[in-house]
Image (cartoon, coloured by chain):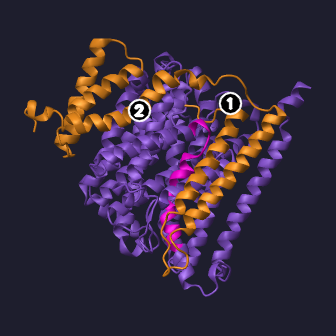
């Protein structure tokens, strides 16, 4: 919950460099925006200005952080927040994209059940009957609330249509 | 008296009235959950409001925002864990009171102060907004662009710890707002040949990603998932420790009054928000106190000051939105989107074109304050005990599930889920490296209006950008922005000089 935890100056320096790189990419793509004669300002001007400012601010941040590295300021050592990066955070990041794919393949009910099992496991729920029961109950309740009651569209799945199999379609 | 018409509008719409009470309950519960903010709850619930009439939708979300600010005090007082950033100062005296067996008194102080601050702020909104709107109605594109420019600079420079990072967050927000078709020439910008990007980035998946998914990821980073079950919950049933005495109310009234003024002024400034207000008023009241050494040990004034102030922010923070069309807070930025979804253009003309709706919303705000006041006064200990039984390892998987269906249901397009995931990762990165999500979102919402005002001004002008220096009101707003930026830069440089480096400490 502590979003204001200090990062090391080295990490902050790389943040500045990444901001500069993003700014450069945005500036390059701004060049692809068509320019027409009828509007003096043009569709390109603002994206070019903003991306240039992003580059300038990123460079400024990198310089500030580099000066801190030289002065030996700030925290050092491994960041405790990285401890669960591989086993919890990255899998959770990927789950949103997997959820979208499973939803298209198998519909809302089945994809929600599978994803809920994985999310509950990542969050430390290890009792299998409880995990499966909670995931099944969540999938059914959410299906009823959002698909049945609120009328959110569920195509049912392009690979296997679970709704048809269960007689929900 | 337009507010009476507002009450008539509200009471003639039972659905809206029901959503006011529901919003008060949802706001208190969500606010009391550590990590989940009112902004996150509103972001998730925006798609639900697509199915409601405009007054019900806006009243529901507006009241969640108000009640959420108060709800944060429950976790702060009972569990020493701020439910929201705006209740962080409440912990300082709230939790020591719980340890002394006075949690009931602390919760009732928080409720009374929150209701006092919020009602006062709402009255400032009701009587101030339509008054200011009369003047802003005559502003043209150059003045509007100057206001937008001021908002970008103020939000970017004051909202976070670092000016540079605040400005980077603002610039990224503007850049995301530029994705899609150019407003004048309709040329594609950053569309990359993806059809869904041609219409611009959708607000709902972006909000859910930045506020909700990033929180889900941040919670997964904790070594042990928080559980309130092992925290101190006061079970002392001595009735004298559970109510504010008349003497305590007398002591707290001036504190509440002064803190409300601070909260109101902070609320009027775009981007500052209730987290700033609560610490400013806590610090100010401690400085004024005859016994500053007792602050932090568990005194009622230490709860009254931050709670009155952080809730007083709510109403005035809507004034820039309703008079200029410029949201001053994250919640106001989300409400801008909801207004637009229902075909209502925010800005000074709203007081002529949708007068009943606006005053109906104000009436909903007043009823909502009373509703969360009742819930808080009588139900806070119960809500605290129930929350202490539900662990985070169960709450956050359900939050993830709700975020997914909310993002999808906004336009029933799986592209929005992918967008939510991408902005979830971006939001998490912003948290990790202390960029401002609030500045990013507010800038994203403002960017389209700012570009339109700029382009219209340049079309009107014979002297190019010189038009902004020909209009006194535009010069005033640009000047205020420049002053705030310079003032903030000077204060940050002074702070940095006062802090010795690690090398100096080692010597």
Bounds of the magenta segment: B431-453
- Classify mark 2: helix, strand or loop: helix
Image coordinates of residue B90 in percent, x first then y, are: 59, 35
Chain whose colour in the figure is orange? A
Residue on which the image places disc 1:
B296
Image coordinates of residue B254 in percent, x first then y, are: 64, 48
Please tell me whether residue B379 is drawn above or below residue A63 in the rendered image. Answer: above
Q: Quadrant of the C terminus of chain B?
A: top right
Which of B17 and B407 lies nearest the eye of the viewer? B407
Is residue B271 visible to us here? no
Count how many numbered circles sit on residues in the image. Answer: 2
Q: Is residue B336 magenta?
A: no
Circle on res. A94: 2
Is residue B11 visible to us here? yes
The secondary structure that dominates the magenta segment is helix
Q: Quadrant of residue A64?
A: top right
Q: Quadrant of the N terminus of chain B?
A: bottom left
Q: Nearer the viewer, mark 2 or mark 1?
A: 2
Which of A62 and B284 lies nearest the eye of the viewer? A62
Image coordinates of residue B423 in percent, x first then y, are: 46, 44
Judging from the image, mark 1 belongs to the subunit labelled B
Image coordinates of residue B45 in percent, x first then y, are: 35, 45
Please tell me whether residue A38 is drawn above or below residue A128 in the rendered image. Answer: below
Judging from the image, mark 2 belongs to the subunit labelled A
Chain whose colour in the figure is purple? B
Q: Quadrant of residue B406?
A: top left
Q: CA distance from mark 2 to mark 1?
A: 43 Å
Residue projecting furthest to the bottom: B462
Which of A124 and A14 lies nearest the eye of the viewer? A14
Residue projecting furthest to the right: B507
């Amino acid at each position: 919950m502590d979003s204001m935890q200090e990062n090391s100056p080295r990490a902050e320096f790389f943040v500045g460099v990444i901001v500069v790189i993003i700014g450069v990419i945005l500036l390059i793509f701004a060049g692809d925006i068509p320019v027409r004669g009828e509007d003096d300002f043009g569709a390109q001007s603002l994206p070019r200005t903003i991306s240039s400012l992003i580059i300038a601010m990123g460079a400024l941040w990198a310089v500030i952080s580099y000066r801190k590295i030289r002065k030996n300021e700030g925290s050092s050592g491994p960041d405790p927040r990285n401890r669960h990066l591989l086993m919890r955070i990255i899998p959770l990041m990927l789950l949103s994209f997997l959820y979208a794919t499973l939803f298209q393949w198998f519909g809302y009910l089945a994809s929600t059940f599978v994803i809920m099992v994985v999310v509950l496991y990542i969050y430390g729920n290890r009792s299998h009957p409880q995990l499966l029961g909670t995931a099944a109950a969540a999938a059914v309740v959410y299906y009823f609330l959002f698909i049945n009651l609120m009328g959110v569209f569920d195509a049912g799945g392009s690979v296997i249509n679970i709704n048809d199999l269960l007689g929900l379609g | 008296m337009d507010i009476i018409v507002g009450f008539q509008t509200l009471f003639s719409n039972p659905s809206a009235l029901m959503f006011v009470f529901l919003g008060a309950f949802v706001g208190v519960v969500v606010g009391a959950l550590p990590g989940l903010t009112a902004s996150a709850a509103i972001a998730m619930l925006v798609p639900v409001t697509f199915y409601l009439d405009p007054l019900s939708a806006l009243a529901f979300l507006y009241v969640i925002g108000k009640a959420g600010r108060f709800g944060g005090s429950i976790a702060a007082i009972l569990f020493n864990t701020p439910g929201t950033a705006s209740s962080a100062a409440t912990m300082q005296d709230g939790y020591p009171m719980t340890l002394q067996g006075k949690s009931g008194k602390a919760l009732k102080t928080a409720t009374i102060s929150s209701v006092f601050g919020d009602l006062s702020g709402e009255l400032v909104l009701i009587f101030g907004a339509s008054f200011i709107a009369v003047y802003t109605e005559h502003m043209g594109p150059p003045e509007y662009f100057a206001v937008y420019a001021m908002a970008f600079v103020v939000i970017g420079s004051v909202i976070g710890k670092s000016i540079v990072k605040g400005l980077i967050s603002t610039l990224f927000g503007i850049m995301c707002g530029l994705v899609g078709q150019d407003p004048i020439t309709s040329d594609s910008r950053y569309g990359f040949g993806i059809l869904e990007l041609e219409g611009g980035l959708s607000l709902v998946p972006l909000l859910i990603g930045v506020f909700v998914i990033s929180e889900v990821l941040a919670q997964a980073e904790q070594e042990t998932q928080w559980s309130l079950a092992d925290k101190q919950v006061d079970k002392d049933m001595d009735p004298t420790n559970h109510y504010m005495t008349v003497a305590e109310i007398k002591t707290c009234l001036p504190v509440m009054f002064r803190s409300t003024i601070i909260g109101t002024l902070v609320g009027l400034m775009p981007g500052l928000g209730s987290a700033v207000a609560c610490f400013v008023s806590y610090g100010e009241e401690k400085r004024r106190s005859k016994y500053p050494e007792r602050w932090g040990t568990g005194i009622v004034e230490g709860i009254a000051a931050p709670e009155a102030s952080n809730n007083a922010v709510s109403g005035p923070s809507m004034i820039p939105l309703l008079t200029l069309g410029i949201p001053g807070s994250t919640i106001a930025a989300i409400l801008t989107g909801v207004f637009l979804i229902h075909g209502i253009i925010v800005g000074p003309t709203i007081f002529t074109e949708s007068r009943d709706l606006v005053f109906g919303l104000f009436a909903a705000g007043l009823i909502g304050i009373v509703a969360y006041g009742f819930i808080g006064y009588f139900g806070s200990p119960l809500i605290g005990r129930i929350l202490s039984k539900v662990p985070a390892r169960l709450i956050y998987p359900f939050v993830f599930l709700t975020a997914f269906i909310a993002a999808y249901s906004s336009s029933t397009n799986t592209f929005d889920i992918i967008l939510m995931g991408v902005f979830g990762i971006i939001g998490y990165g912003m948290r990790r490296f202390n960029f401002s999500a609030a500045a990013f979102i507010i800038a994203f919402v403002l960017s389209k209006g700012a570009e339109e005002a700029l382009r219209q001004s340049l079309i009107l002008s014979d002297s190019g950008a010189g038009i902004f220096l020909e209009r006194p009101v535009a010069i005033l707003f640009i000047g205020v922005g420049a002053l705030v930026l310079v003032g903030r830069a000077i204060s940050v440089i002074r702070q940095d000089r006062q802090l010795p480096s690690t090398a100096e400490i080692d010597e």
